[in-house]
Image (cartoon, rainbow, N blue to C red):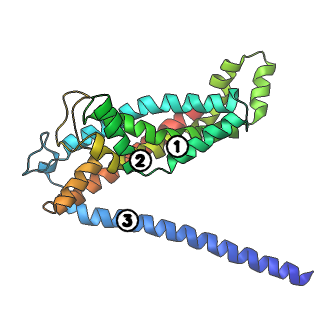
Amino acid sequence: MNKNGGGGRILSAVLKILVWLCAAITFAVLVFLVVFILAKGVGYLKPSLFAWEYTSDNVSLIPAAVNTVIMVVLTLLIAVPIGVFSAIFLVEYAGRETRLVKIIRMTAETLSGIPSIVYGLFGLMFFATALKWGISILSGSLTMVIMILPLIMRTTEEALKAVPDTYREASFGLGAGKLRTIFKIVLPAAVPGILAGIILSTGRIVGETAALIFTAGTVAQIPSSLMGSGRTLALHMYVLSSEALHMNEAYATAVVLLLLVLLINGVSGVIAGKLMKV
């Protein structure tokens, strides 16, 4: 018995060390990436990079930044309601672990594993060619909607399932209907999990290049409408680095992209905190 107890304590200590080691490695890699990007790019941030119009001399990132914000907002406006309402149907109406739910879940997981270049080719053939929308912000946004829908659906579904059934039973006991219970009780309790999925989706939109090359295009200007072509910050950075003529500006763009992602995450965290207090 003592031997078994001693072996259990040793195993527990080893596992604890491994957990801390993995956490330290992950944190170290993150810090290294951030420091590397800042060290490489901060020194090359200059006023010409923030000119309103792009030229081959200033390689301004402002048009790409504006296009990125447009892409994120438009994509989330379409994807979030569809993803959240789909998850509500799966959890609250379809019945948990039914055949229909399993098929939809398997389909969503399959879509999550498809390479982004395949989404880009689909968007090019369907939105740009078949629907005749051309290489445009709208084509790129709808392609991104298809890409992030599985992520939003799955995270929202897990967040809704994590809400205790006692919340629903108490609401029903007080005479509230199904729909009122979902929107007044269940959804507010699931907000942190839903926002986590939205934040992850936002990161994927901001960092996507392969799919948007074929759908949104690489024009370095702010389009006059959603049917115009425009590059995002990630695409802007990719084009600059692939040309190998403006590597310093590419690193500076990476700094701005990093700060934009941190800003989005920070704002999302503040919104989540406000909603939780409400």
Which residue: 67% across, 40% down?
A: 102
Left or right position of 129 against 268: left
Q: Quadrant of the N terminus?
A: bottom right
Query: Amino acid under label 1?
Result: Leu
Q: Are marks 2 and 1 in contact (CB under 8 Å)?
A: yes
**Image: 182 above or below 35:** above
Res. 151 mark:
1
CA–CA distance in space, label 3 to label 1: 25 Å
Q: Residues within 10 Å of mark 2 (few under 14, many from 20)?
A: some
Q: Quadrant of residue 93?
A: top right
- Judging from the image, what secondary structure is the residue with disc 1 in? helix
Left or right position of 117 against 44: right
Residue 13 appearing in the image: yes
Q: Residues within 10 Å of mark 1 (few under 14, many from 20)?
A: many
Q: Nearer the viewer, residue 243 or 277?
A: 243
Q: Nearer the viewer, residue 197 or 100?
A: 100
Left or right position of 241 against 98: left
Which residue: 42% across, 29% down?
A: 77
Res. 204 mark:
2
